[in-house]
Amino acid sequence: MTNTSNLSEKIAKFYDTSSNLWEKTWGEHMHHGYYGRGGNYKLDRRQAQINLIEELLIWADIKEVSNLVDVGCGIGGSTLYLAERFNTKATGITLSSVQANRATERASEFKLEETVQFQVADALNMPFPEDNFDLVWSLESGEHMPDKKKFFQECYRVLKPGGTFLCVTWCHRPTNSWAGELTEEEKQHLEEIYRVYCLPYVLSLPEYETIAQDCGFSNIKIDDWSMEVAPFWDIVIDSALNLETIAGLLNSGWQTVQGALSLGLMSRGYERGLIRFGLIYGQK
């Protein structure tokens, strides 16, 4: 069993030390880009990241929002984008105080400090009343959660009846198909990714669907967008190969350097079909 408080500290430290460099090099969105249904569109990386948000809104049929929470908000990329897009109240939570502070600064830059708040909080024990938000948005934070079921339960608890839950998370390939259980080599590949990116474990998309059902979500749907986002990692690798980024990496400490040196782990994971980009939608 993962030591939760120890893991939380590691995750916080990882993002405390790397977020500034990520923002300088890659911008405010700390998530994959969307490169078309076959992953063939040649796009500016930041545009691809915006496109991912927009495609998710279409997929989940989200047309209006009055109060949202962004679980694992980074420096507020999605939170502020959605707050502007829907002219809505928004709250972002992260384990990293550096991220929360920077996101708060950015809310002021956007002139959204009255309606958008950021705070350090644990997604497994959110400091919000039940039935509070009409959208619970989690874009690439589920992989960090040491208890996936507790995470989904918390998201369900804070969601208003009729509200929308959208979780987009790193998965491994399904094991209930002809490919069978994960091989020892695949497990080793995943363990390397877990170590570098402070992940306790990832699940397959069918396993997430079962958890969503067990937590009481209705109208559940899932999708796999691995092909649509896979080009992202090679593009990040290419953009990291300049002197300014390398200097920034060296200043950010060993954990950030390790993360950068291991970008190829994700790229190869997609290539071999081991890493999957999973979408889970449900309503309360």
Image: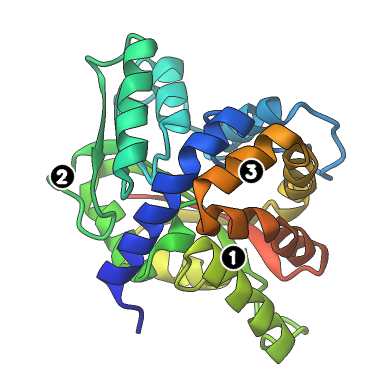
Q: CA distance from mark 1 to mark 2?
A: 28 Å
Per the rendering, the mark at residue 128 is 2
The amino acid beneath tag 3 is His
Q: CA distance from mark 1 to mark 3?
A: 14 Å
Asked if 77 appears above or below 114 in the picture, the reply is below
Q: Which image quarter is the N terminus in? A: bottom left
Q: Earlier in the sequence, mark 1 or mark 3?
A: 3
Q: Which residue is mark 3?
A: 32
Q: Is residue 69 visible?
A: no
Depth check: 170 or 60 in front? 170
Residue 155 appears left or right of 260: left
Secondary structure found at label 2: loop
The amino acid beneath tag 2 is Phe
Asked if 226 appears above or below 49 in the picture, the reply is below
Give residue 144's quadrant in the image.
Answer: bottom left
Depth check: 278 or 206 in front? 278
The residue mark sitting in front, 3 or 2, is 3
Residue 137 appears left or right of 91: right
Question: Which residue is found at the position 20% from the left and 51% from the top?
Answer: 126
- How crowded pointer 3 is (Cα within 10 Å; few <14, some 14-19, many 20+) is rated as many
**Are dots 1 and 2 in contact, CB under 8 Å?**
no
Secondary structure found at label 1: strand
Per the rendering, the mark at residue 171 is 1
Question: Which residue is found at the position 25% from the left and 68% from the top?
Answer: 5
Question: Which residue is found at the position 31% from the left and 61% from the top?
Answer: 9
Asked if 115 appears above or below 234 in the picture, the reply is above
- How crowded pointer 2 is (Cα within 10 Å; few <14, some 14-19, many 20+) is rated as few
**Are dots 3 and 2 in contact, CB under 8 Å?**
no
The amino acid beneath tag 1 is Cys
Give residue 193's quadrant in the image.
Answer: bottom right
Secondary structure found at label 3: loop
Q: CA distance from mark 3 to mark 2?
A: 28 Å
